[in-house]
Each structure stands twice: as C-alpha cells, then as structure tokens.
Image (cartoon, coloured by chain):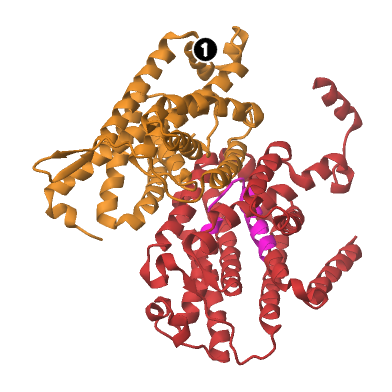
Chain colours: A orange, B red
C-alpha cells in the first residue's frame, strides 16, 4: 500500500489522464466482444490473444522498417481474414451450442495462439517505437506520451466509423437483424452463416487495431492476452450489449481504476486487481438481481 | 453383480498397491495420475453433476499447496526467514518434524479451502452458467497474481517446500511416501464420490443441473446444497494440492500452485474426455489423458501446448459427451436403460 498519490495532486492528474486514454483502447476491444456476443452468443476467451496477435503484426512491419502507426491499417485487414478463417474452422461449430462449450473451445484456441506467438515472435517483452515524443503538461510535472493520445484518437475514429457502418451499410443492417432474431433474419433472406463469419472477422479486425495501438503505447508479450479478454468481458457486462456510449464510459472507468490501483497497491498487484474487480462486479450484480429473484442471463 | 464389483475393486486396489514396486521408475508419474484422477472426480461433482462448470477449483488446489508448505515450515521455523533466498538451507527439518509438519499441513489444507469455499459460496454460486465459469476463472487467476505479490510466502521467486528428511537413507522412500499418500487420497475420494452417487444428494445436484428454478420450486434449498457440493470439491482439491506441493518441492505462484493454464484446464478436460456426470468417466478420462500427455509430450517437445490447445478444441467441439457418453449411446442396455424400439424409430423419423 502506498498513498503517495494522495499527497501529490499532479500524480493524480497523471493517473487520470493515463487511465482515460487507456480506457478508450479497452473500450474498443470490448466493443468487438459485445458485437460477437450479441450477434453470435459466443464468449471469446481468445479475444485478448487476437489483440496481441494484431500487435505482433504491427511490430513485424515495424521490424521491416515501416512506421508502426501503419499497423492500424494493415493489422485489421490481416486480422479480418484470421477471424474469418477461425470462424470457418472452429467457431461455426459452437455457435448454437451451450455457452460453456464456446468458452472452452476458445480457451483452447487461446492456448494455441499463445504458443504459436511464442514460437514465431519469441518470449521477450517487445515494444514498437513510434518516436512521437511526449507532451509535458503543468510545468513538466505530467508527462503524456503522444502515442497514447494518438491511440485514443484512432480508437475513437474507428469506433465512430464502425457505428456508422453498422447503421448505414447492407452488411451492418444484416448483422443487426441477425442479432435481434437470427431465425427471422434467415427467413427474410439473410445469409446468417456469412453474417456470423463477417461479425467474427470484424471483431478480429477491431482486435487488430487495438493490438497495433498497444504495440506502440504499451508492451507486447505472448502470454498477456487473457487480461485483455477479462477487461473486455468486464466492460461488456457493466455496459450491456450494444450500448456504445456505456461501453466507452465503463472502459474509461476501468482504465482509471487500473491506473489508481497501480499507484496505490503497487504494480505487482495490477493484474490481480483487475481479475478481483471482475469477481466483485459479478457478485455485486448477482446480489442486486437476487433482490428481485432474478439472475444474470 | 455384487461379486463382480468386489473382484473389480479389490483387483484395482491390489494393482494400486503393487504398482510402485512393479513400475518402480514411474512412481512420480503414478502419483501425478492419482492426483489428476482426484481433481477430475471432484471437478465432475461440480461441472458434471451440479452443472456449475467451474474453472476455479484450481483456487483450492493452489491454496492447499501453499497452506501445507507454510504450516510444515511455520510449525518449527520462522516462515519469513525460510522464504528469503536460501532460507531452506539454514533450517533443516528432522524426520519427526517433517512428518508431523506434513500431517498437520494436510489437515489444514483440507479444512481451510473447504471453509473458504463455504464462505464465498453464497456470493459466487448465485451466478449461473457462463457467468459462474468466467467468475471462477477470474478468481483463480486473481489468486495466482495476488499470491505472487505476497512477500511472506516467497512472492514471485517461489517457495521451496521442506526437502524430504536426509536421515532416511532409502532413496526410494520419498517416491513411495508420496505415492501411497496420493493413492490413499484417491481411494478416499473414490469411496466418498461413490457414496454420493448412491445418495439423495446426487439427485438434488442433478435436479439443480437440469432445472434450478424448478428444483427450488419443489422445495429444495438449492443454495445450501450447492455450497455443500462446492465444499466437498474444495476439501479434496486442497488435499491434492498439498500432496503435489510436497512432491514437486517448489511452489511458484502462477506456474505451479494457481496453474490455471495447466491443472485448471486439465481437470475440466479430463472430466469431459471421460464423460461428465458419470462415476467412472473422470477416472478413465484422467488415465487416458495422462498416458496421452506423457506419451506425446516428449515426442513433440515444444509443441505440447499447441497440441493441448488443439486437443481441447477437438474434444469440446466433436466429443462433448465424452467416452462414457459415447458408450452410453452405443450400448444403452449396459447402462441399465430400457429402450422402446417403437419410440426410438419414431424419434429417428422425426429427425
């Protein structure tokens, strides 16, 4: 326990800004999860590993001498096809089944991804240098890497673009129709199989964008995927499915929580605090609902 | 039938008793097998019988591991100095201290996890389905991360459990001791689970699995039974963890104790492979899995996790009923099911 943060107000500003910028990134991942959960009724444990894979794609092009920021365009394109392939290979067999089956199957996929990434990219912690420099605020007492501002900006840009796409385009409407009632959509001529594949692909592409941003703002390691999955799961259960403003707000809330937990409890408890928060949120929701004799569905 | 059972059980027990002498080189593997079967059987009580698919039994396993080692050290020496680097070299357990320590430690590691399961049960078991699964997954990982930050139990650098007393000259003694300990645990667990299978308790658990709301409407206090079921699992998981801690000799927070990536998944996988909701399914599943793992692991060194992941996907997607479920479909008469030929035909036509 360390209460230094309460003695120095500038640290609080620092933690808040970091938290909010980080939270926007989490919200992007969570939006992808909400999308596939709402449309296909699947909980994807491999979500975080898709993020990390997207990050490694950006890191690879950085190693080739291309600026890693291009990753936010290249990575989602590749990840879309990874997601599509994954759907065709495994996910389409678990769509209509028990949710636990999808959890276990995607858990298996997560293990495969982790290990393959470990083989291909090595077990070192890596980061792609964007060389965007830092912004100093309040007499140099708050440092803000420009890459974080860039990542928040890109996240918002993509999220807005996706919302417009979902509202206006034919595929977007088909996806929303399938989410509302898959059977009715099928009767009305929507190729639900294609919609599912596209949804999973779009989710993977969102993960790719988030991963590319993480590669320049944070660090990459083959085994850090699961915390991202849990963060996005947490944001989705707090915000509900298909409620983008709520997803953004709870994403930022989670980012704030994490930064403050980092300062107060110490960095070694950061991931533990995230997982514990998940448990606490679920238990809180459970007690709130049980007053009305209901349960989480 | 009764006599057949008697022959089966007595031959299995005799096999278990002579196994460490027959396969002297594989004692550690046999100990692993016993612990894996115990974990699979206790998971089956949760996931198979009660329908609460948990990833969180690893919490009790890891807890048992830390508790046994801590008690074994803490009874005789200061724990904090032991876990500082090289502490295990300064203090040496005598033979009597070692066995006293591990005895009391195992007792604690059985009771405390069960009590903790009872304490958090009311909050956690109110969640249903996948929320329960994710919540327990979070619980297990949070425990690992937090244990990795606590200084007194070794934090990130790990905890060396007391070495087997050097006064015992017999080099085989350590392996035999842990094997018979785990075998005793296995026999105890099997008897307990078999007793549950013949009792009303199992029917209640099945009722909760099939339709919890209806079970409640029939006047069953579902929460009470769910908590008791979870406590039973925790009791045996804690013991299994304590034995494994002594056997491995070194406890790491995320790689050995709260090892959700290996043990936590293994227990689910073994129960599903054998067939959840059956008495023998987890036993067969764990045995098959262990043979498969040990046989294949060395052949595909480095690729074992890829193979594990693929195995999970294949089992879950194509084989969710498990071996026993498959047998049951094929030979329903053996399982005491009577099939109406007309009814079966009608169902086939409906499909």
Q: Nearer the viewer, residue A66 or B170?
A: A66
Whether residue B5 is in magenta: the answer is no
Magenta-colored span: B35-60
Q: Main secondary structure of the magenta part?
A: helix
Query: Quick one: B14 or B156, which is closer to the camera?
Result: B156
Tell me, yes or no, if residue B298 can be seen here: yes
Q: Left of B287 or right of it: where is B201? A: left
Q: Which residue is mark 1?
A: A174
On what subunit does the disc labeled 1 rest? A
Q: Position of residue A90 (x, y in %)?
A: 65, 32
Give the image location of residue A179, x and y in percent: 51, 19
Q: Residue at x 69, y 71 (%)?
A: B28
Residue A245's spot in the image, x, y percent?
32, 25
Say whether residue A236 is visible: no
Q: Quadrant of residue B177?
A: bottom right
Judge whether B135 appears above or below B294 on screen. above
> Which residue is rendered at x = 73% and y = 42% of the image?
B321
Quarter containing the N terminus of chain B: bottom right
- Compared to B6, does A273 lie above or below? above
Picture quadrant of residue B314: top right
* Residue B33, picture quadrant: bottom right
Tell me the quadrant of the picture where the C terminus of chain B can be found.
top right
């Amino acid at each position: 326990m360390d209460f230094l943060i309460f003695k120095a107000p500038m640290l609080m500003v620092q933690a808040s800004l970091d938290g909010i910028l980080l939270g926007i990134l989490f919200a992007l991942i969570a939006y992808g999860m909400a999308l596939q959960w709402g449309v296909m009724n699947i909980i994807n444990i491999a979500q975080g590993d898709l993020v990390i894979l997207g990050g490694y794609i950006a890191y690879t092009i950085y190693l080739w001498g291309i600026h890693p920021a291009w990753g936010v365009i290249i990575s989602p394109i590749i990840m879309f096809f990874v997601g599509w392939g994954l759907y065709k290979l495994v996910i389409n067999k678990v769509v209509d089944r028990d949710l636990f089956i999808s959890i276990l199957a995607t858990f298996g996929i997560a293990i495969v991804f982790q290990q393959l990434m470990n083989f291909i990219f090595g077990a070192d912690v890596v980061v792609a240098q964007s060389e965007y420099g830092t912004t100093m605020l309040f007499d140099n007492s708050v440092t803000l890497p420009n890459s974080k501002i860039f990542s928040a900006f890109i996240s918002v840009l993509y999220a807005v673009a996706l919302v417009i796409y979902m509202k206006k385009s034919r595929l977007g409407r088909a996806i929303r129709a399938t989410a509302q009632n898959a059977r009715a959509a099928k009767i009305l001529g929507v190729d639900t199989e294609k919609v599912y594949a596209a949804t999973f692909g779009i989710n993977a592409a969102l993960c790719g964008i988030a991963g590319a941003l993480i590669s320049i703002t944070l660090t990459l390691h083959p085994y850090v995927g699961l915390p991202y999955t849990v963060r996005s799961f947490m944001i989705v259960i707090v915000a509900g499915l298909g409620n983008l403003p709520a997803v953004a707000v709870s994403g930022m809330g989670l980012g704030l929580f994490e930064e403050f937990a980092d300062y107060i409890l110490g960095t070694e408890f950061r991931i533990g605090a995230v997982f514990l928060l998940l448990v606490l949120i679920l238990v809180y929701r459970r007690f709130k609902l049980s007053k009305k004799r209901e349960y989480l569905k | 039938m009764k006599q057949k059972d008697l022959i089966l059980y007595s031959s299995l027990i005799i096999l278990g008793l002579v196994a460490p002498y027959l396969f002297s080189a594989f004692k550690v593997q046999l100990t692993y097998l016993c612990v894996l079967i115990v974990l699979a059987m206790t998971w089956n009580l949760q996931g198979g019988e009660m329908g609460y698919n948990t990833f969180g039994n690893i919490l009790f396993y890891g807890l048992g591991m830390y508790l046994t080692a801590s008690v074994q050290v803490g009874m005789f020496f200061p724990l904090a100095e032991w876990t500082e680097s090289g502490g295990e070299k300064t203090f040496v357990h005598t033979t009597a201290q070692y066995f006293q320590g591990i005895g009391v430690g195992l007792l604690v590691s059985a009771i405390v996890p069960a009590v903790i399961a009872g304490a958090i049960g009311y909050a956690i078991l109110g969640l249903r389905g996948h929320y329960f699964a994710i919540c327990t997954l979070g619980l297990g990982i949070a425990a690992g991360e937090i244990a990795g930050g606590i200084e007194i139990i070794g934090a990130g650098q790990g905890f060396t459990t007391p070495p087997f007393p050097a006064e015992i000259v017999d080099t085989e003694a350590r392996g035999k001791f842990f094997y018979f300990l785990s075998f005793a645990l296995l026999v105890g667990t099997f008897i307990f689970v078999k007793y549950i299978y013949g009792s009303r308790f199992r029917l209640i658990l099945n009722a909760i699995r099939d339709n919890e709301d209806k079970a409640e409407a029939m006047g069953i206090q579902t929460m009470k039974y769910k908590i008791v079921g979870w406590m039973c699992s925790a009791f045996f998981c804690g013991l299994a963890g304590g034995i494994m801690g002594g056997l491995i000799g070194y406890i790491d927070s995320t790689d050995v104790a709260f090892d959700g990536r290996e043990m936590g998944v293994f227990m689910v996988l073994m129960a599903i492979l054998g067939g959840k909701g059956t008495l023998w399914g987890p036993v067969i599943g764990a045995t098959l899995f262990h043979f498969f793992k040990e046989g294949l692991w060395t052949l595909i060194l480095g690729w074992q996790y890829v193979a594990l992941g693929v195995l999970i996907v294949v089992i879950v997607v194509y084989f969710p009923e498990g071996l026993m479920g498959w047998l049951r479909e094929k030979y329903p008469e053996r399982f005491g099911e009577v099939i109406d030929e007309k009814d079966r035909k009608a169902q086939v036509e409906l499909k």
